[in-house]
Image (cartoon, helix red, strand yellow):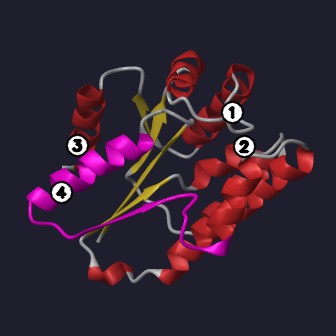
Amino acid sequence: MQFIVIDGLDASGKSTQAKLLSSFLKKRGRTVFLRMHPSNDNFFGIRAKYFLQQKGKSAHFNAALFYMCDVIRSVITYSWRRYDCIIFVRYLMGTAYLPKPLERIAYHFFATIVPTSSFMFFLDASPAEAYKRVSLRGEELEMFESLEELEKIRQKALALALEDNWIIVEADRTMKQIQEEIRRNII
């Protein structure tokens, strides 16, 4: 079983790249389970999404807490043996949304209790590009989707990715270029 993580800032292209990769692997005859976080099918994911729409420090903390509970629930709930490939969208980098120094403590704590992989991709979109993409969605912005917040989060997430040997993919490029780089690292 191959475990793949695709993570990055909001609007870095995580879901798009995961769906493209899932489709590619299925066409090659592999069974694939794709899981996105926060998810809509359980209490933790729903609460994480709720708190992402709120303001204030307690909402900030609760969003991260419920998000990590959602991830842990996914790890525990689903039978990994039934699939050739498991793809998680958003995983450990959700901890980068916590204030310093909690992000580093939470990251290392959760990294000891959930599986990790040599196929953990951090889609490194510049904050300006991520903000532009988020703004084009036409949806209400979440608490972390301002240019200032994206800059802070990228700095923390990139430091964690570099420290823990993530595969860093420059994500200001085209979907095709990003997908090709991900595939090159997997195959």
The stretch in magenta equals: 14-43
In this rendering, is residue 58 above or below 67? above
Residue 120 in the figure: left or right of residue 142: left
Q: Which residue is mark 1?
A: 153
Give the amino acid type for the residue marked by disc 4 in the picture: Leu
- Disc on the earlier residue, 3 or 1: 1
Is residue 98 something that shows in the picture? yes
Q: Residue at x 68, y 23 (%)?
A: 151
Estimate the x, y position of residue 16 in percent, counting from the top left.
35, 42
Q: Which residue is mark 2?
A: 97
Q: Secondary structure at mark 1?
A: helix
Whichever of callouts 4 and 2 sits on the residue coming sooner in the sequence is 4
Secondary structure beneath disc 4? Answer: helix
**Extreme residue toward the top, this view:** 128
Mark-to-mark CA distance, 2 and 3: 28 Å
Q: Earlier in the sequence, mark 4 or mark 3?
A: 4
Q: What is the x, y in percent for residue 87? A: 37, 60
Q: Secondary structure at mark 3?
A: helix
Q: Quadrant of residue 153?
A: top right
Specify which label sits upstream in the sequence, 2 or 3.
2
**CB under 8 Å between callouts 4 and 2?**
no
